[in-house]
Image (tube, rainbow, N blue to C red):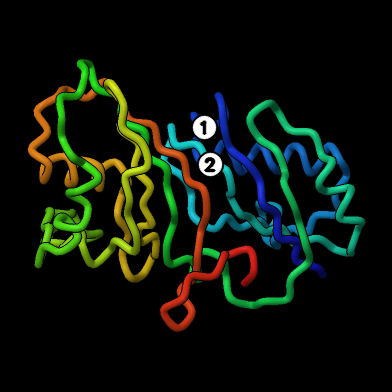
Amino acid sequence: METLRIVYKKQKYMKFLSHLELMKLFERVFRFHKLPLKFSEGFNPHPKMTFASPLSVGFSSQSEIMEVQINHKIDIETITQMQFPEGIEILKAKYVTNEKSLMASIDFSEYIIRIDFKSTLEFNAYEEKVESFLNQSEVNYEKKTKKGTMKTVNALELIKGFSVVFKEANELILRATLASSSSAGSLNPELFAELFLNFCKNEKEIDHIEVERINMFMDQNSSLVSLYEL
């Protein structure tokens, strides 16, 4: 048995697929290309596939990571040339032997957050407010736990890096590296943008927010390493 790690894009209309629909799509494509899939045992066998961190519906990505187990090795070129519907594209793949699961390994995700406002932005030095935003002692919000109770979370503890990369007319683009751990906590990029705009006392009505994930990382001795290199 071999474990194949794959990096792929999820863009255009594909960003509206749910995680379950995405899994079914990969299974259909793998079956079509006769990939020697390893199946689970039991009454309802299914391909052994894992995804690092499911994206919210509507989020696009430049670099998603998944793993699939197969019965024997095949050429990597066969994998990278597989044809998916427009919006899904395999970028690279390799065989791995690491036993730690992708989902348990991811610590942070890096995002580009594009915010369009319904009216032109007045002068507001968003870039100059990044440091003061991060230097606060706390930026709290309420989050529902799995037990249904509410708890207070300090968002600053979940931010690894943040910058304003573009501002013009009615558009603001943020780049942020946020916690994305299933065990240690995560911060939704849309919520993060809302917290920052509230700090900036933004009064402009938001038309829409687009979120694109550009990388995923594990934390090794306080240094971020691409999850693909795990």
Q: Which residue is mark 1?
A: 15
Whether residue 39 is situated above or below residue 123 in the rendered picture: below
Give the distance between the C-alpha atoms of the residues marked 2 and 1, in whole angstroms: 8 Å
Quadrant position of residue 76? bottom right
Look at 20% across and 16% down and name the residue there. 119
Residue 100 percent coordinates (x, y): 58, 76
* Observer-nearest of 130 and 83: 130
- Determine whether 114 is above or below 176 in the image: above
Q: Quadrant of residue 11?
A: top right
17 displayed left or right of 159 = right
Is residue 159 shown above or below 163?
Answer: below
Q: Which residue is mark 2?
A: 61
Tell which tag, 2 or 1, sits nearer the viewer.
2
User: Is residue 141 visible in this depiction of the protein?
Assistant: yes
Within 10 angstroms of label 2, few (less than 14), some, or many (20 or more) residues? many
Residue in view at x 39 percent, y 32 percent: 210
From the viewer's side, name the closer residue of 125 and 16: 125
Relative to 188, is 42 on the left or the right? right
